[in-house]
Image (spheres, grey):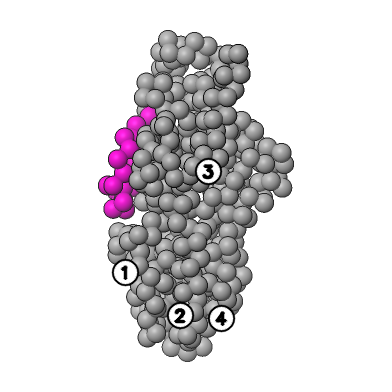
Amino acid sequence: MAQLSDPLSTKIGYVVKRYPRFSETFVVNEILAHEAAGTGIEIFALRPVQETHFQDAISRVRAPVTHVPDRHRTADVLWTQLARAEAVFPGAAARAMCAGGSAADVTQALVIATACRERGIGHLHAHFGTLATTVARLAAAIAGIGYSFTAHAKDIYHDYGHDTGLAEKLRDADAVATVSEFNLAHLRNTYGADAEKVTRIYNGLDLGGLDWRAPDPDATEILAVGRLVEKKGFHILIEALLILGERGPRPRCRIIGQGEEEENLRAQIAGAGLAETVTLDGPLPQPDVFAAMRRAAVLACPCVVGRDGNRDGLPTVLIEALALGTPCVGSDVTGIPEIVRHDETGLIARAGDSIALADALQRLLADADARSRLSRAGRALVERDYDIHRNAAALRGVFADCLARRSEARMRGAA
């Protein structure tokens, strides 16, 4: 493998569904780490931005962003784009049709493939094995370059009601990364030989500005952070808070985030009589979230498997909390126990079990010494396994290997 600290001599094209997105800080962290190492990045976004709030880190990304048009999906547009691509890539039409995909996907892929040639982009990397990888696979086939993707969770486990082509994407990709050992085992058990190319690379953080602090022994507040969607399990948290209130004084809890379940959660809070102690605070800038973590006694991450199979892979909020020193309670979903190691770096409660969650929260609220012990071990684990500069370097090593194999194949073909 190439030296992991080396920048790549060719630019990498990142293909994502939308950019920027408030919740996808892991993509931004990764790109910033590549740029800090001197690697050139270009970003291709396939759908319009839907949000109005973004994290401050977005402003530090230097990579240009191409918002690939997605609304002009007539046959005339497709044929026009095919004609342009044929001038750059003879045989592009045939390669596009052989690779499959809808007219809209092919049209976007043609735009990206042409941009790769014009801008010196030698490899494409997508996040999530759904739309972004569909288009990256097509664009790579047209341009004659390689592609890779990072599989997270929804793209692996969610029941979309149709075949997303994940098997074909695994087969054709030059390399694949995923964010947990749980995902790695699942992909290899499900897809066999096509998944042998998958590598586990954890998401990470730039720890340079995240100083660890011992948790406040007098802190009493429970904090939860994430999108207000079923898989985050905040409805289970509210049930646990009700249980804790029946056992003694009601603890205060802040839930930071927004999402489709907000109305249901507000009704649940009101129905449980918790409106005076539980607040839904909406989305907040990252510095405000970090400040809330430092004040909290414990961060709750009660993720569950949704009714449609959707689940979290390994929530970035856990990495952030442990880096800052906030003790965590998580659930036994996918990769969470890989970072919240029970009674070592945090506590694990069985997913969907509000009594077990209440027990774990009560234990930490009552034991400042345990919070301190878990906090120190949590920071040590984050430094070892979740440093974004080290993990992004591992991903650049994957890119370098892909580029080297492609180069060797071309040289053999020319010989």
Q: Which residue is mark 2?
A: 372
Assign the N terminus to one quadrant of the image. top right
Residue 192 image point, x, y percent: 72, 41
Q: Give the mark nearest the N terminus, 4 or 2.
A: 4
**Predominant SS along the magenta part:** loop
Residue neighbourhood size for the residue with mark 1, other residues' Cα within 10 Å, grouped as few (<14), some (14–19), many (≥20) = few
Residue 87 image point, x, y percent: 42, 10
Q: Give the mark nearest the N terminus, 1 or 3.
A: 3
Which residue is located at x 51 percent, y 25 percent?
145
Which secondary structure lies at badge 1? Answer: helix
Q: Give the mark nearest the N terminus, 1 or 2.
A: 1
Mark 1–mark 4 Cα distance, whole angstroms, equals 26 Å
- Relative to 37, say whether 255 is above or below: below
Residue neighbourhood size for the residue with mark 4, other residues' Cα within 10 Å, grouped as few (<14), some (14–19), many (≥20) = some
Mark 1–mark 2 Cα distance, whole angstroms, equals 18 Å
Pair 1/4: label in front: 1
- Relative to 307, say whether 327 is above or below: below
Where residue 342 sits, quadrant-wise, is: bottom right
Which residue is located at x 41 percent, y 72 percent?
325
Q: Which residue is mark 1?
A: 291
